[in-house]
Image (cartoon, rainbow, N blue to C red):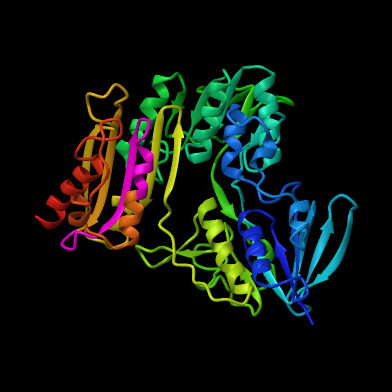
Amino acid sequence: MSERLVVIGGDAAGMSAASQARRRRGADDLEITAFERSSWVSYSACGEPYHVAGYVDRLESLVARTPQQFAAMDIDVHTRHEVTEIDLAKRAVVVRDLQEGRSFLTEFDQLLIATGARAMRPTIRGRDLEGVHELRTLDDAARLRQIADAGTGNVVVVGGGYIGLEAAEAFHVQGWNVTVVTSGQRVLDRTLHSDMGQKVVDSMRRVGIEVVLGTRVECLNGSTRVESVGCSDSTHPADLVVLGLGSEPEVELAEAAGITLGSTGAIAVDDHQRTAAAGVWSAGDCAEAMHRVTGKPVNIHLGTIANKAGRVAGINLGGEDAVFPGVLGTAITKILDTEISATGLRLAEAKAEGFDAVEGRATGTTTAGYYPTASEITISTVAERRTGRIIGAQIVGGSGAAKRIDVFATAIWSNMTVQDLAWVDLAYAPPFSGVWDLIHISARNAARLALG
């Protein structure tokens, strides 16, 4: 008799798991049913700002597989269906058909919770005014693209994280007047050292994007439609507001069912993606992962992590054995010509975690200095004193700068020291780097501090 796997959530983690399980177990052995409350499955949320900007014209280009394509794999996908309850005693979920307005029960033998994360929605007066949007789903991206294409005006982006910066670029290239308002003293203040964040602020201001720092937005003003942002005399005119205040794991279903949450507030899982409840698994933005530097649970919302964790869950559901090896939080973005990336721990984070850490810094050019496309790049390397072990890095610079972070991610993953990295045989040609890459120089500078 076959088992039934029910998947809650049809994006990266959920559908990666379903696909991997299906590759290992046929439909006569494992029946797979997935429920997704939105209109889309298996899509690239990371591509949404680039659709709004017009870089990616067709929204459908962001979809990896459709429900019909999953059906051809004997995976039954139901969009516009929301799971409203998990009943562990009955081994069943309650599902609401959002189109038909009816609810029904679906039993399971194995359950994968991949409910993801939702946009943070702090209390802001006027948040429900017309013209106030988020950028979280493909439907959000479609609406914002339509607005961006229809004309220009003043847009205020609330939030200085990844989504806020990418939304700011999207509307800037579409010809809008853009203001970014953030409560942080710099943009990306949870990702970058303060002076590195200031470099990004300076680059935004140079191209005409207004950046307002250290300001918490509590009021959106207007009668029926938003007209301005801010409670005090310092208000900012707004024909459109995009809220990019970060995200939080969506765990209410799991919590209501009595499934254990971890210290981060996300669902606690082991290294096979199993929860504490028998036959219940979780992966993606709603689940914890282990940080490879600290050894502690973290909850980081990145598509790379969701896809990998989903793959591990699916392999195990398929009857094989896979272990999720942990994360570093490696991330990359850009705003116009400025590229930004980071991995591991910032210096302040490292010290807060009890590491005796130092930082090596290097500033130079992305190519040989005499090459015509040379642009500035700054690299920060964080290392443990005495051992020299690399535990973090950050990069801000021009075209060609940010993907250097992958070298650091590989080094941290492999427990390399700054001494090791300072001598690694990296490729060189004038269009790509100096003969000593800034990676080498930053590692060498960190070695001097760490090892004396």
Residue 144: horizontal and vertical position, in percent? Answer: 66, 30
Please, is residue 137 above or below residue 271 in the view? Answer: above
At 56% across and 39% down in the image, what residue appears? 244
Question: Which is more toward the observer, 111 or 235?
Answer: 111
**Residue bounds of the magenta highlight:** 385-406
Please, is residue 47 above or below residue 415 in the view? Answer: above
At 70% across and 26% down in the image, what residue appears? 146
Q: For this view, does 22 lie left or right of residue 308?
A: right
At 66% across and 32% down in the image, what residue appears? 132
**Observer able to see residue 166:** yes
Question: Which is more toward the observer, 363 or 315?
Answer: 315
Rendered-image quadrant of the N terminus:
bottom right
Residue 404: horizontal and vertical position, in percent? Answer: 34, 43
Residue 149: horizontal and vertical position, in percent? Answer: 67, 21
Does the segment drawn in magenta span residue 26?
no
Residue 243: horizontal and vertical position, in percent? Answer: 59, 36
Please, is residue 54 above or below residue 253 in the view? Answer: above
Residue at the extreme bottom: 1
Q: For this view, does 345 lie left or right of residue 439?
A: right
At 68% across and 67% down in the image, what residue appears? 22
